Amino acid sequence: MSNNARALLIVGHGSTVNPDSSAPTLAHAAEIRRRKVFADVECAFWKEEPSLRDAIFLFDPEAAREVYVVPNFISEGYFTQTVIPRELELNGRSTKRPNGQVWKYCEPVGNHPLVTELLLQRAREIAPGVPETETSLLIVAHGTDLNENSAAAAKREAEKIRALGKYADVLNVYMEEAPLVAGWRKLTKSPNVVVVPFFISDGLHSYEDIPVLLGIAKEKSTSNCISAGGEIFQRNPYKIDNRSLFYAPSIGTDPRFADIIVAQVNLFDDAFSGIILAQTENFDSKS
Amino acid sequence: MPDLIERSLETALTNCCRVGEISIRRIDGGGFIVSHCDDRGRDDLQRFQNPEEAAEIARYDDAGNYRPLKTVPNLCHGWRLELVDLTKLRRALDYFYPGRLAMFAAWKENRLTTTPLRKTLTRQSGMYRVASKISDEQINDLVGNFCRSNGGCLRTILWKRDESAAVPSTKLPSDKFDASHGQALSPRSATPATTAPVIPLLCQEACSLLVAECRKVVKMTNDE
Ligand code: SF4
């Protein structure tokens, strides 16, 4: 099928309080749109507009015969398994609508193997010229999110990077459960420490909570932290106890996440195209 | 080739120049100028050319507060966006009112289906499951206040309260439910919605903010 008949829907969580929540998803969509590899590229959000319910009507059924749905989520969980399929009326990996449009449900971005490479690139870029063998890499996740597997995903990424043997140490740490990010001084021994939040977007956690836990920002200041939030990433390295700490923005804000979104579409095609074609033909011959 | 949404926008623009709080002007020789409708005639507006900048403009109100629902009539003032063609105009309008042009195009083609509020509420899970306990009377009050065009939301409501097809609120004027009208009332200019044709901002199903409000009402009742 030509690219002209394929559309892409990127699904984000969005927020009614954090203005930066949807920004990376919108930016990735604009970037992929520029590449002209899909007939149409749209976003939909649980907490912003267009809503997941709007998404059903976003694509011209004549022009877009296939709609790939990629959740811009860091892991599988309640949203990818319950909310998104329910709101988009998906009944499996592939769903044929009454108008003939086929919706293909891809895995969340966080599941893609390229995320590991991106974490490595981010870590190198935030601490240029700093030898990895003298550096500990900390991947921070929330920890107690009910029904979300982001903690497990962060652990998996840490294990993969540790196995490469590049860094002095690689740790998955959490905001609200052990091993705690606040314990980094004891958890790490190397002279340099690189910290990458394992989130889809920046917000209160990456702008304020984690910096406070790391000891590079003061407890809840009265100023509007969200609007000034980006500054926290501009002051690297932080010198603490004769060690250098480098703090990166959330991994999902990296423009290269756009590549991962497209890669999830390709992975879907590689994994399912044969099976789905057979199912669709079956369906057609019955109807 | 322009897609369906651009075609439907082009057709709509032949006799109207208004969507929500935004006024659209054609420039001689091609292109468009969009601005807040209150700002027409001002010559001190900050100029923008990139449709992507519309996302930034739409993000905060005049006081700098985040706008989670873009159809709330609190679009900021003081800017003007110059767009060279229809594709860029469509993209910009899609940042100002995400998804609304597509809903309009689907509605024009009779493809837009609506979902009664009760169906939306019973579909919820997790912390929003309780929202379905809201009474009809509470819905009447809540929707009458939360969705009202004057200060609430500029969308035209197409959904019903439930399968009985009752209107969700008797407190709203009948044109709030009439897509041929459009709700262009702006707090500052207070232009009556009927003076000029507008591209309606359609609401075919209750938004997540209204669902969250329903939950709040139920929680408050339970606490009493
Ligand atoms: S339910 Fe529709 S009309 Fe009411 S506030 Fe939400 S978007 Fe606006």
Image (cartoon, rainbow, N blue to C red):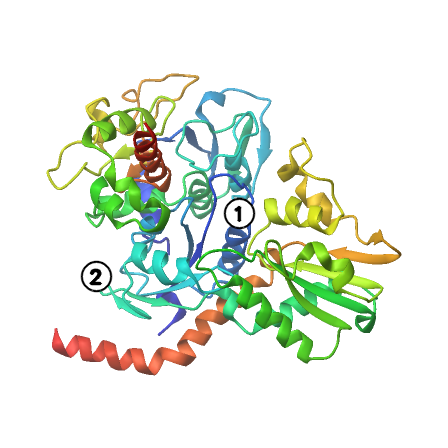
Quarter holding the C terminus of chain B? top left
Q: Is residue A113 above or below residue A248?
A: below
Viewer-closest of B181 and B160 = B160
Side (left or right) of B92 relative to A186:
left
Mark 2 burial class by Cα count in 10 Å: few <14, some 14-19, many 20+: few
**The furthest residue to the right:** A242
Q: Is residue B22 above or below residue B2?
A: above
Quarter holding the N terminus of chain B? bottom left
Q: Where residue B43 sits in the image (x, y, percent)?
A: 57, 21
**Quarter of the rendered image showing ligand 1:** top left
Amino acid type of the residue that numbered disc 2 sits on in the rendered structure: Asn
Asked which secondary structure carries label 2, the reply is loop
Viewer-closest of A34 and A120 = A120
Residue at x 29% of width, y 20% of height: B195
**Tag 2, which chain?**
A
**Quarter of the image where one finds residue A252:** bottom right
**Quarter of the image where one finds residue A49:** top left
Residue B173 seen in the current view = yes
Q: Where residue A250 sits in the image (x, y, percent)?
A: 62, 55
Side (left or right) of A166 relative to A108:
right
Amino acid type of the residue that numbered disc 1 sits on in the rendered structure: Ser
The disc placed on residue A89 is: none
**Quarter of the image where one finds residue A142:** bottom right
Name the residue beneath numbered marker 1.
Answer: A21
**Whether label 2 touches label 1, CB < 8 Å:** no
**Tag 1, which chain?**
A
Name the residue beneath numbered marker 2.
Answer: A99
